[in-house]
Amino acid sequence: MSTETPRMISLRWRIGLWVAAWIIAAIATVGIGLGFLLYAWMFPSGLLNECMPKDWDPPISDTVFLILGWAIYVGLTICGLMQKRRVRYFIVFGILCVLLAVNVAGCHVALKQPINIDD
């Protein structure tokens, strides 16, 4: 049995890395079009665009999905920032980064789709 203490990560680093991930995701999403930041509240909808078929009609409203999406990000943030051990922190941080990457890709897909006013 090992008596070695687990490696810890400071709160300052945890917060800094978390903020950096979100800043990189924001820059990757909006590029140089800063006007898209007005739609930041819709960010979780990118997950649907990337993960679901284009003809899929979700059983829940867009508002409910956005609330659930933001709840996932808030839950991950709370869970991640509570982790003091490096390994646990980086597992949760990795999940966040994967979700952000998928979300950014989905937002780019949504931005390239024509808007259908007939819906």
Image (spheres, rainbow, N blue to C red):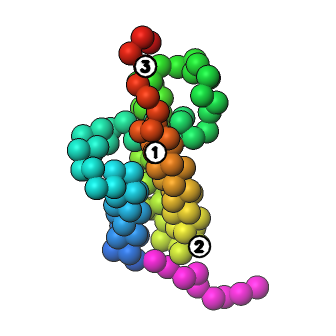
Q: Where is residue 6 in the image (x, y as percent from the top left)?
A: 58, 81
Marks 3 and 2: CB-CB under 8 Å? no
| Mark toward the start of the polypeptide (3 vs 1) | 1
Marks 3 and 1: CB-CB under 8 Å? no
Name which residue lies at 44% across and 12% down.
Answer: 119
Mark 1 surroundings: few (<14), some (14-19) or many (≥20) residues within 10 A? some
* Residue at the spot of label 3: 116
Name which residue lies at 54% across and 49% down.
Answer: 102
* Residue at the spot of label 1: 108
Instruction: State the separation of the CA atoms marked 3 and 1.
Output: 17 Å
The range drawn in magenta is 1-9
Residue 66 left/right relative to 57: left
Assign a secondary structure to mark 1.
helix
* Residue at the spot of label 2: 87
Q: What residue type is labelled 2?
A: Val
Give the label, 3 or 2, closer to the camera: 3
Q: Where is residue 30 in the image (x, y as percent from the top left)?
A: 33, 50
Position of residue 85 relative to residue 58, above or below, is: below
Name which residue lies at 60% across and 28% down.
Answer: 54
Position of residue 30 relative to residue 61, above or below, is: below
Q: Which amino acid does label 1 sit on?
A: His
Q: Position of residue 99 (x, y in %)?
A: 53, 51
- Tell which of 67 and 25 is nearer to you: 25
Give the label, 1 or 2, closer to the camera: 1
Instruction: State the separation of the CA atoms marked 1 and 2.
Output: 32 Å
Assign a secondary structure to mark 2.
helix
| Mark toward the start of the polypeptide (3 vs 2) | 2
Instruction: State the separation of the CA atoms marked 3 and 2.
Output: 46 Å
Q: Which amino acid does label 3 sit on?
A: Asn
Q: Quadrant of residue 38?
A: top left
